[in-house]
Image (cartoon, rainbow, N blue to C red):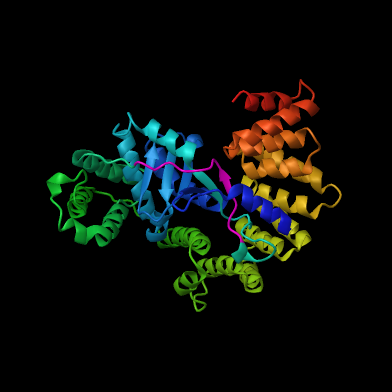
Amino acid sequence: MKRIFAFLISCFVTLGANATTLINDTEIEKKLTEIILPVARAADIDEQRLKIHIVNDDDFNAFVRGGEDVFIYTGLLKQIKNPNALRAVVAHELGHTIGGHMVQISQRMHDEMMRTMVIQALGVGLMVAGGNPTAGVGVMAGASGIAQQSMLSFSRDEERMADDMAVDLLVKSNNNPNGLIEVFEQMRDISGEFETRVNPNRINHPLTTERMNNTKTKISKIKNIPKKSKSEIQTENEEYEILRAKLIGYLDIHKNVITKYPYSNKTNAAIYARAIANMKSGDLATAKTGTQTLITRKPNNPYFYELLGDIEFQYGEYDDSVEAYEKSLELSKNAPQIETALALVLSERNKPNDNSRATELCKKVILKEPSPLAYWILARVSKEGISDWAMAEFYNMNGDITNAKKHAKSAQKKLDKKSPEYIKSGDILKK
């Protein structure tokens, strides 16, 4: 397994110190979609086209491109403490889209980000080299390098319009618009001192206090503010806190995680964050105990089994890891990231039929959400020809055109000229 991780790390970890990544995590993306979907529907956005992108950056920020691609920063998720406030942020950004404020430049910005952003898988358990989580890092997938991101600024009038539209979208989607007030309160806490020293006529955004007062005035005129039951709000908040705990567990250092979620905190979110943090720090026994507690409490949660699969893989207990991942897939149904993780464990275990199962999983992932790791595993479990083509695709997705063409040329020497892989290899050679 040490050789596997050494190769993975050398191939994937090509980022500079200032690189920005997109995080790919099935659980977080699914939950964020559930949270945002009501306001997207209220904005008449096709839910089949809605796509969540998680930006690994501590900025308190989010933006929407065309109503279809929603970019949410981890800094926002760490600080926004309930789903209604998060919906308000996205509703505001959708307000810009509906108002046509981004029409001329949104496509250009999106194309630049998607071309240069790097994707980081969170939950696949690939942070470990030879059982030592401190010796490696999470596997990176996607194009190498990152261009400097240019953020948009809008006129004060456009911001006011977007705030008004956010209130309308929240009410239309049967959500309490006071979530927007909560966001402004947090923004004021972050930038209040700075705003006392600036000339409001020389900045593109209205001052936070002004925006808050304008929004309060608009909300005060609403006759029937949507209200949810206490139990519904509690359930939503608990599920959102699980999402935040996972992010914090993976992204923060162990000491900070334990400070935020001390062992005296027995909530599912706290146990989840600690289990992830302990896994990262190498305390697999404590991580496993916490994860098993979560599974006992929530036996139908697929992502707790996913975490158990990660831990067992790092233990080198491949049979137990496969069992946990299979259970996770059984409960989650459609989860390319978990399918990729299972394929990796199967390729490492290498029992009879493991390669064929890994091949099946990788092909499914490639059809739905192609990733360099899926191609790399497919190359590992395939015969010559297919293996060469898969490595060509692997290097191509990582931006290494020289090696991509090298493997594509080798693939064409071994493949039937009518095969799809031969044709795809030709496409790479044309670059």
Measured from the top left, where is residue 181 in percent x and y?
A: 27, 55
| Magenta stretch, residue numbers | 136-150
Residue in view at x 63 percent, y 28 percent:
428
The N terminus appears in which quarter of the rendering? bottom right
Q: Is 64 placed left or right of 331 in the picture? A: left
Q: Is residue 258 visible?
A: yes
The C terminus appears in which quarter of the rendering? top right
| Residue 35, above or below 295 | above
Measured from the top left, where is residue 147 in percent x and y?
A: 43, 41
Is 115 included in the stretch rendered in magenta?
no
Measured from the top left, where is residue 57 in percent x and y?
A: 42, 53
| Residue 131, above or below 418 | below
Is 147 included in the stretch rendered in magenta?
yes
Chief SS of the magenta region: loop
Q: Residue furthest top?
A: 418
**Image quarter of residue 416:** top right
Of 222 and 404, the residue lying toward us: 404
Residue in view at x 38 percent, y 43 percent:
149
Q: Is residue 66 visible?
A: no
